[in-house]
Image (cartoon, rainbow, N blue to C red):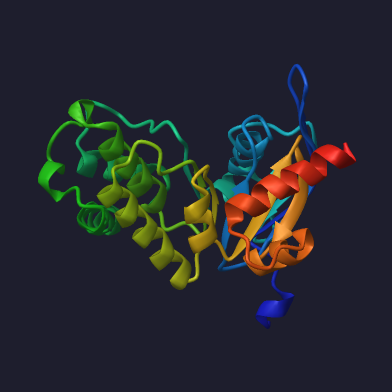
């Protein structure tokens, strides 16, 4: 089967979620296999709600979610097995060391113990955590906790990695390291979906960029495609983002 006939990494149709207001409004979104997709938008646009529904952490009210062809609303276990999730608030077990935490998480996904140990050691080294690999996580800085959380999302070798503001609280060196790890995963065939308010990073790393507002996808494309849409051939992403926001406000 050729790659052109394979289902996309993520296909969302009519996705809807309402709390006290409509947070996600019939969203349609397709993310291709092996791409680094940046999902951008102002605060309250519906980005985190969307990603939480894709990750299985939040139930959708309506619509469909397919991850590499798996119906994520019907078969949540199968979908979660191929997804890694990193939130903007790292949630790890303080009483465990990084190695213990990674082996614990790997065990939850049914990874064989010897494979889990090897992957844990590799990730600890990759993310610069070797000097604290035997220390309890309770004393870690936010940046260190974020790196442990990222390692935990990668330890079962997911095909789709979803990250919600993963660079929050990281110093420049740690942020560069995390970006390098994610770029390497994409080169190896993984698909990454990431939200960030740091538009320079989205501009530099994203293969395609989606802009969401009011729970709707209002613009999407490569940087050059967004430039063509706005009619500004040499604009940076920050200028494009603001222009798209103005266009959407005028339409509304």
| 4 to 152, vertically: above or below | below
- The residue located at (27%, 55%) in the rendering is 123
Is 164 on the left-hand or right-hand side of 183? right
Q: Is residue 4 visible?
A: yes
Q: Which residue lies furthest to the right in this view?
A: 251
Q: Is residue 38 visible?
A: no
**Of the pair 181 and 160, the residue shown nearer to us:** 181
Is 154 on the left-hand or right-hand side of 245? left
How many labels were placed on the picture? Answer: 0
Q: Which quarter of the image is occupied by the N terminus? A: bottom right
Residue 192, given in percent of the width and then of the height, sits at 52, 57
Q: Residue furthest top?
A: 20
Q: Which quarter of the image is occupied by the C terminus? A: top right
- The residue located at (39%, 53%) in the rendering is 154
**Of the pair 53 and 107, the residue shown nearer to us:** 53
**Of the pair 11 and 171, the residue shown nearer to us:** 171
- The residue located at (72%, 57%) in the rendering is 220
Residue 20, given in percent of the width and then of the height, sits at 75, 16
Residue 125, given in percent of the width and then of the height, sits at 20, 56
Is 203 on the left-hand or right-hand side of 93? right
- The residue located at (66%, 39%) in the rendering is 50
| 33 to 192, vertically: above or below | below
Residue 129, given in percent of the width and then of the height, sits at 19, 47
Q: Which residue lies furthest to the bottom in this view?
A: 2
**Of the pair 119 and 21, the residue shown nearer to us:** 21
């Amino acid at each position: 089967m050729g790659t052109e006939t394979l289902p996309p990494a993520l296909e969302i149709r009519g996705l809807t979620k309402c709390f006290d207001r409509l947070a996600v409004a019939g969203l349609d979104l397709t993310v291709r296999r092996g791409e680094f997709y940046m999902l951008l938008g102002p605060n309250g646009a519906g980005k985190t709600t969307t990603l939480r529904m894709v990750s299985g952490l939040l139930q959708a009210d309506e619509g469909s979610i397919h991850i590499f062809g798996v119906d994520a609303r019907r078969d949540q276990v199968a979908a979660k097995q191929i997804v890694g999730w990193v939130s903007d608030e790292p949630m790890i077990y303080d009483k465990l060391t990084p190695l213990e935490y990674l082996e614990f998480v790997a065990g939850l996904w049914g990874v064989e113990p010897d494979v889990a140990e090897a992957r844990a050691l590799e990730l600890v080294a990759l993310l610069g955590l070797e000097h604290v690999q035997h220390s309890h996580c309770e004393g870690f800085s936010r940046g260190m906790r974020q790196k442990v959380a990222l390692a935990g999302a990668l330890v079962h070798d997911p095909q789709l990695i979803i990250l919600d503001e993963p660079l929050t609280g990281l110093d420049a060196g740690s942020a560069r390291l995390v970006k390098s790890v994610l770029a390497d995963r994409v080169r190896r065939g993984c698909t990454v979906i990431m939200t960030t308010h740091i538009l320079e990073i989205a501009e530099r790393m994203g293969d395609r960029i989606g802009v969401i507002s009011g729970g709707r996808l209002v613009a999407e494309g490569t940087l050059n495609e967004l430039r063509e849409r706005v009619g500004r051939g040499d604009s940076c992403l920050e200028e494009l983002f603001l222009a798209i926001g103005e266009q959407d406000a005028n339409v509304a």
